[in-house]
Image (cartoon, rainbow, N blue to C red):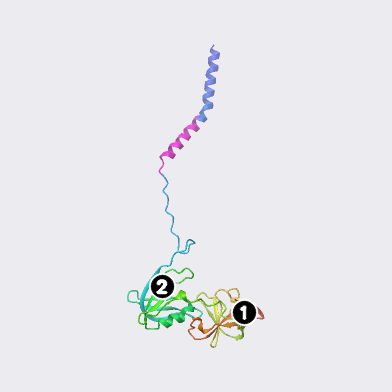
Amino acid sequence: MDSEKDDNLRDKTSHGRNNRPLLIVIILLLFIIIWLLIKPPVPLLPRPPLHEDSPGPEKPQKERMITGIVTAYKNNPHLDVNALELKTKTSGTVTIDFRPHTAEAVTRIGTLGQTVTLTYSLHPNDEVVGYQLMAIENKRSGIKQILKDLPPPPDVPNHQTQNFTLDKPVLITDQYGGIVALHKNDLLFHFKPGLVDDIAPLIKENNHFDLVAVRRPDDQGFINVNHDKVYIVLSITINNKTFLVR
């Protein structure tokens, strides 16, 4: 009889030991469930604003108007007029850019010393400039020009190519050191931005060039500050090697 009681006691003890890990697991699960129920919710952070250069939906241009006196005109590295200075009563002197092929129209309406009202955008989408001119109106004559109505010039003005041989021309570069043109006497040979970057060291190391180029007509709206004859370069030959640049 005592033997049976001892056996039952051992069975209960063994069963208790076997159930102990399961009990611990259940208790841990209960603690986890309670912690999940009572912990504070994680706050949702606001989405960071898009940087102006970040990809995303196109932003509408912010148009502004300003009135002042035209005091000066500026040019780009290609020596084409592409900006005006305006003296205003409220903002001092401001500089507003415009596309070079619109220079003739802009300077005709806004001659130096004239009072004009300008419509401009703050953040143009196609180029990096401070302010982009969209329209100009002469306050005295009332003449107005919307610049987007002026057709852009063709990439290659015409197909009447000419051959030139240049010895020791003046090398014209932009503020970053990129080559933009070769200048000789009253002739300026225009390179489209970026098209001679690969051969820039070769151009800088040499003084003799053979060019195939086409004349840019004077009636396309550009104004060269030196009144040079401007040619668009199609190819350049250096040390008997020819490179197409258009």
Q: Which residues are magenta?
A: 23-40
Would you say the magenta stretch is mainly helix, strand or loop? Answer: helix
Which residue lies at the image location 52% right of the left edge and 26% below the top edge? 17
Residue 202, x across and y down, in percent: 61, 77
Label 1 amino acid?
Answer: Ser
Location of the C terminus (image quadrant): bottom right
Q: Position of residue 236 (x, y in %)?
A: 62, 80
- For the N terminus, which image quadrant? top right
The magenta stretch spans residue 229: no
Secondary structure at numbered mark 2: strand
Mark 1 or mark 2, which has the lower sequence index?
A: 2
Q: Residue at x 37, y 72 (%)?
A: 65
Q: CA distance from mark 1 to mark 2?
A: 37 Å
* Secondary element type, mark 1: strand
What residue is disc 2 on?
120
Outermost residue on the left side: it is 89
- Quick one: which residue is furthest to the bottom in this view? 185
Hey, which residue is sitting farthest right in the picture?
A: 240
Kind of residue sitting beneath label 2:
Tyr
Residue 30 painted magenta: yes
Q: In the figure, 176 relative to 22: above or below?
A: below
